[in-house]
Amino acid sequence: MKLNPLINFCSALAPVSDELLELLLENAIILSVCKNTRLHPNGIGGHNAIFIASGTLRKYAVIENKQITLSLYGENEMIGFTEIANYLEDESLETIHDSELILLPKDFVESLYGKYPEVDKMVRKIFSMKYQKLVYESRLCRLPSADHRYRIFSDANGKYRLPARILASYLVMREETLSRLKTKHKAKNYIKCDV
């Protein structure tokens, strides 16, 4: 894997100078990670920004011996080292599927701010995307109906392929409820297609 996904991501946020591209090529670390690899704590997460070129990651907490999925991260998403540093003691980050990650060391990223104005623009846009994601996740977990949460998630997140236990914990429902809702919505979609 090359750095093309990261370069495309950065270029979509702001024009990237050739000099900055050279620095990315020199300092970025490409990493293939197996599913269920813990990235934080006691992993690569604490001192690197993580760009997900392929795969899916999740932030989770263990409460009363149950893993509760708090957030999902998919392809072409950046997780900043400041975001990971603010995880609570009981929160972890792990891969759900085999993943291709691009790591940007904290010291390297911090050295870019003063020298390259486009980095500041990129970071502000990334923060804006993070804010929108937090608003979405906050809204999703507050909806009282499991059916409504499932519909909203399904409409907005076709990109995630998740094990049932992880999706159920993310949508704040039991696996049995999730199974019933999947069956119900498949039947509704089948009827719509036939009409």
Image (cartoon, rainbow, N blue to C red):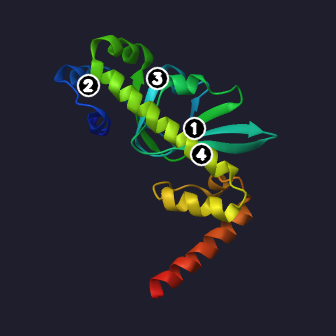
Residue 170 seen in the current view: no
Amino acid type, label 4: Glu
Amino acid at pointer 3:
Asn
Q: Earlier in the sequence, mark 3 or mark 2?
A: 2
The first of marks 4 and 3 along the sequence is: 3
Q: Residue at x 63, y 27 (%)?
A: 87
Q: CA distance from mark 2 to mark 4?
A: 34 Å
Counting from the top left corner in percent of width and height, residue 122 is at 35, 28
Tag 3 residue:
48
Is 8 on the left or on the right of 64, as rendered?
A: left
Can you tell which mark lies on residue 25?
2
Is 102 left or right of 35, judged from the image as shown? left
Are there few (<14), some (14-19), or many (20+) residues within 10 Å of tag 2?
few
Q: CA distance from mark 3 to mark 2?
A: 16 Å
Q: Are marks 1 and 4 in contact (CB under 8 Å)?
A: no
What residue occupies the far bottom of the structure in this picture? 195
Q: Using the image, determine if residue 76 lies above or below residue 46.
A: below
Disc 4 residue crowd, few under 14, some 14–19, many 20+, Cα 10 Å: some
Q: Earlier in the sequence, mark 1 or mark 4?
A: 1
Which residue: 32% across, 37% down? Answer: 9
Q: Nearer the viewer, mark 2 or mark 4?
A: 4
Quadrant of the drawing holding the N terminus:
top left
Q: Position of residue 59 (x, y in %)?
A: 60, 38
Q: Is residue 100 above or below residue 166?
A: above
State which tag comes first along the sequence, 1 or 2. 2
The mark total stands at 4
Q: Residues within 10 Å of mark 1 (few under 14, many from 20)?
A: many
* Amino acid bearing label 2: Leu
Residue of label 1? 94
- Residue lying at 62% horizontally and 54% vertically, measured from the top left: 167
Residue 130 shows up from this direction: yes
Q: Which residue is mark 4?
A: 137
